[in-house]
Image (tube, grey):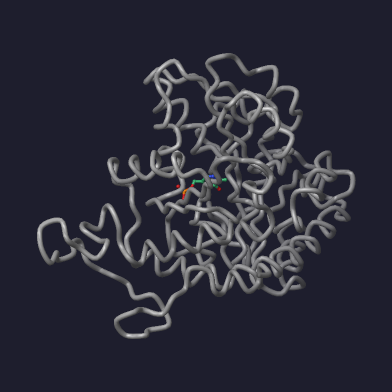
């Protein structure tokens, strides 16, 4: 089945008791049992909920995986993966990943004796040489946030497979419409469902998708034991969001391409980060592992001051100044003071994240209106 069809029909079975075409919102905490231990597959809604089950099936199908697990947020999904580890274990991860992931690793998990090594994963040799006999997990994000760096998932997978190390990929920026890491050899795909999968800026949710049955059992055990599950209403909203992922992503990609090109030709813009440019260092890999280049763009101004960046950020009207991404409406954001404020400044600059960097989540409005808005703001 082709992707556009899968997105509409994934996991959707009419409700057996009524024939309702849309999976109902099972707003219930518990399920009556016919006799002790005799039930219809549902006992208590932290463990299972039919709306969540329908969504988890859909998530698995659209990522070409066998199992899906939905969490109360993206960071809760990441948290579950790290809880597979023991004190003394090492994790290799990208040096410019999502700020909240960095915060979770350094501020929460380091104190439990798990070691995190940050390397530039765009050069896969760095991953290979960071591996020790304590390495249990490689955590990738591609494209990265916000510099749009690209890591070759298949190349890293061939390294981790040979050493029996788990490979998890944060696929939030690409969405399953553009990239399917399990097909490239990853063991776990993580999503901040909050972004493109939800797509309408109205839900916080996370997901993990995997093929291995044993891995699914371990992660399900953590999900149920730690309890970071999403509510049925949120699962319903994401089931609805997934149906339009195809049409939305197509529009995000088209607008992204137009705006990236326009920014690049603007005399006040110093540099544009977008993986669809042929001279982007990750272009060849992006072309190989992604179906298109997405609607996330970052740029630096020629007047490289924090004041000028702030002036632009407060001058747009269609681009709303806000954290997050992946919704139908365009957002503009300042990583240094917003999404990546939790990363120390020296660390940030060292990793190429300048004070004046501006990040766009290009929505699906008319591209001419968006360009007009940016043109007036950049001035
Ligand atoms: C937003 C985001 C997360 C965290 O997800 P939440 O749903 O906010 O908990 C993780 N990774 C990336 C790339 C993100 O953009």
Q: Position of residue 74 (x, y in %)?
A: 46, 47
Q: Position of residue 238 (x, y in %)?
A: 46, 65
> Depth check: 192 or 28 in front?
28
Query: Farthest residue toward the left?
Result: 35
Q: Tell whether 120 sits left or right of 111.
A: right
> Depth check: 24 or 338 in front?
24
Q: Tell whether 204 sits left or right of 59.
A: left
Residue drawn at (36%, 67%) of the image: 51
Q: Tell whether 205 sits left or right of 297.
A: left
Q: Tell whether 242 sits left or right of 369.
A: left
69 lies above or below 17: above
160 lies above or below 293: above
Q: Position of residue 340 (x, y in %)?
A: 55, 38
Q: Quadrant of the N terminus?
A: bottom right
Q: Quadrant of the C terminus?
A: bottom right
> Depth check: 255 or 312 in front?
255
Residue drawn at (55%, 46%) of the image: 189
Classify residue 363 by image quadrant.
bottom right
> Depth check: 195 or 175 in front?
175
How many marks overall? 0
Q: Position of residue 350 (x, y in %)?
A: 68, 25
Residue drawn at (83%, 60%) of the image: 262
15 lies above or below 50: below
Residue drawn at (76%, 28%) of the image: 123
């Amino acid at each position: 089945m082709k992707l556009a069809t899968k997105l509409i029909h994934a996991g959707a079975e009419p409700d057996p008791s009524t024939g309702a075409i849309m999976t109902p919102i099972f707003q219930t905490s518990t399920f009556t049992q016919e006799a002790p231990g005799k039930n219809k597959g549902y006992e208590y809604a932290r463990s299972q909920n039919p709306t969540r089950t329908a969504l988890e099936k859909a998530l698995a199908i659209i990522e070409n995986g066998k199992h899906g697990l939905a969490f109360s947020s993206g960071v809760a999904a990441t948290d579950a993966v790290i809880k597979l580890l023991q004190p003394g274990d090492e994790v290799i991860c990208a040096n410019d990943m999502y700020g909240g992931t960095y915060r979770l690793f350094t501020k929460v998990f380091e104190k439990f004796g798990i070691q995190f090594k940050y390397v530039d994963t765009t050069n896969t040799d760095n991953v290979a040489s960071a591996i020790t006999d304590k390495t249990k997990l490689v955590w990738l994000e591609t494209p990265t946030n916000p510099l749009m760096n690209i890591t070759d998932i298949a190349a890293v997978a061939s390294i981790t497979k040979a050493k029996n190390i788990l490979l998890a990929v944060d696929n939030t920026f690409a969405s399953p419409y553009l990239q399917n890491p399990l097909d490239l050899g990853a063991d776990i795909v993580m999503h901040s469902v909050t972004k493109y999968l939800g797509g309408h800026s109205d839900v916080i949710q996370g997901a993990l998708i995997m093929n291995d049955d044993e891995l699914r059992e371990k992660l399900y055990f953590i999900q149920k034991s730690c309890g970071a599950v999403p509510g049925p209403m949120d699962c319903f909203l994401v089931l609805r969001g997934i149906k339009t992922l195809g049409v939305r992503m197509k529009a995000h990609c088209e607008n992204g391409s137009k705006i990236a090109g326009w920014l690049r030709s603007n005399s006040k813009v110093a540099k544009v980060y977008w993986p669809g440019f042929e001279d982007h260092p990750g272009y060849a890999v992006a072309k190989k592992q992604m179906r298109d280049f997405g609607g996330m763009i970052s740029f630096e101004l020629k007047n490289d001051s924090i004041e000028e960046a702030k002036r632009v950020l407060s001058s747009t009207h269609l681009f709303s100044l806000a954290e997050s991404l992946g919704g139908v409406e365009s957002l503009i954001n300042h990583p240094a003071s917003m999404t990546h404020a939790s990363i120390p400044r020296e660390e940030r600059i060292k990793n190429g994240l300048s004070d004046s960097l501006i990040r766009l989540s290009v929505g699906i409005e008319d591209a001419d209106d968006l360009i007009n808005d940016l043109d007036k703001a950049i001035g």
